[in-house]
Amino acid sequence: MSIPRAECGRSSLYSLRSPGRNDADGTPPVTTAATPTLAAGLDRDTASIPPKIGGPITVGEFLRDTWLPQKRRQVRATTAYRYSWFVEHYVAPAIGDVPLRRLRVDHLDTLYVQLASTGGRHGTGLAPKTVLEVHMIICAALEAAVA
């Protein structure tokens, strides 16, 4: 299975929006009843944890401890929740234990193929747009890692 490589940028994500939908992937927005619970959980994580001393930092540690807390200050609570859900359910189980300095293209290609073929609730694979969203999260995190 071949998945087209997406460029890191905003134009590819915006072009996938359907008219009349509230969210980029067509899902309804999170209800206001869930918002206080989300906000309480996100407020708890506002201060980023300093990087550990010694040893390599893994992709999962970087995403959870550095990138997500920084993004939570820049985006809406529901967007931050979605980012953390993607990281916890899709990225961390597959490549979370890979040291950040050792991450290669083949790790990401394997992740994208796995998500497209067997990811999702029923093991039938995720939609290409969802795989693209995971790619955009990883791309933004890697850009922050080298900045």
Image (spheres, grey):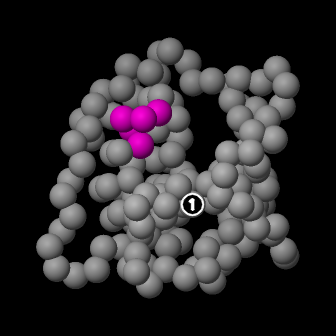
Quadrant where the C terminus is found in the figure: bottom left
- The span picked out in magenta is 71-75
User: Taking 108 as reference, is 92 above or below it?
Assistant: above
Q: Position of residue 87 (x, y in %)?
A: 49, 55
Q: How many other residues sit within 10 Å of disc 1, few (<14), some (14-19) or many (≥20)? A: some
The reply, left or right, for residue 132 in relation to residue 70 is right
The reply, left or right, for residue 147 in relation to residue 91 is left
Predominant SS of the magenta segment: loop
Quadrant in which residue 18 is drawn: top right
Q: Position of residue 33 (x, y in %)?
A: 47, 16
Q: Is residue 127 magenta?
A: no
Q: Position of residue 141 (x, y in %)?
A: 47, 58
Residue receiving disc 1: 139
Q: Position of residue 32 (x, y in %)?
A: 50, 15
Quadrant in which residue 60 is drawn: bottom left
Observer able to see residue 57: yes
For the point 24% across and 48% down, which residue is it? 48
For the point 14% across and 73% down, which residue is it? 53
The reply, left or right, for residue 41 in relation to residue 63 is left
Observer able to see residue 90: no
For the point 35% across and 45% down, which residue is it? 70
Quadrant in which residue 31 is drawn: top right
Given the image, on which type of amino acid does mark 1 rest?
Cys
User: Taking 57 as reference, is 122 above or below it?
Assistant: above
In this orientation, which residue lies closer to the viewer: 48 or 29? 48
For the point 81% across and 69% down, which residue is it? 3
The reply, left or right, for residue 128 in relation to residue 131 is right
